[in-house]
């Protein structure tokens, strides 16, 4: 995911002759439509969904349980 919708998508400017990467610049997932800056500001974004899942997994009651394997 790109950082923002600005030139160089938030990375340090690099002369084109030294530039080896590429950004998604067109379509549904272009940096103008999907980027970290915009996703952080929308509570229903995919980025915030992933962050909340990470926080839920860190809670104690999700870390404990019993596992039984009868296949061995």
Image (spheres, helix red, strand yellow):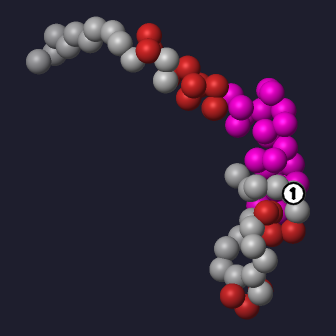
Magenta residues, dominant SS class:
loop
Q: Magenta stretch containing residue 21, yes or no?
A: no
Point out the residue furthest to the bottom here. Answer: 17
Q: Is residue 38 left or right of residue 62?
A: right
Q: Residue at x 87, y 68 (%)?
A: 7
39 vs 56: above or below? below
43 vs 30: above or below? above
Percent of width and height locating residue 21: 67, 74
Instruction: Look at the image and give the residue range highlighted in magenta.
Output: 24-49
Q: Is residue 26 visible?
A: no
Q: Residue at x 56, y 29 (%)?
A: 54
Q: Residue at x 80, y 69 (%)?
A: 8
Dividing the picture into quadrants, the one containing residue 4 is bottom right
Percent of width and height locating residue 23: 74, 65
51 vs 63: above or below? below
Which class describes the residues within 10 Å of circle 1: few (<14), some (14-19), or many (20+)? some
Q: Magenta stretch containing residue 25, yes or no?
A: yes
Q: Is residue 42 visible?
A: yes
Dividing the picture into quadrants, the one containing residue 47 is top right
| Quarter of the image that includes the C terminus | top left
Q: Is residue 60 left or right of residue 25?
A: left
| Number of numbered discs on residues | 1
Q: Which residue is mark 1?
A: 5
Q: Is residue 9 left or right of residue 62?
A: right
Percent of width and height locating residue 56: 55, 20
């Amino acid at each position: 995911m790109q950082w923002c919708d600005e030139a160089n998508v938030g990375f340090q400017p690099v002369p084109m002759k030294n530039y080896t990467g590429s950004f998604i610049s067109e379509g549904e997932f272009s940096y103008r439509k999907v980027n970290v800056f915009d996703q952080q500001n929308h509570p229903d974004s995919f980025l915030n969904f992933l962050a909340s899942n990470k926080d839920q997994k860190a809670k104690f009651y999700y870390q404990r349980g019993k596992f039984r394997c009868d296949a061995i």
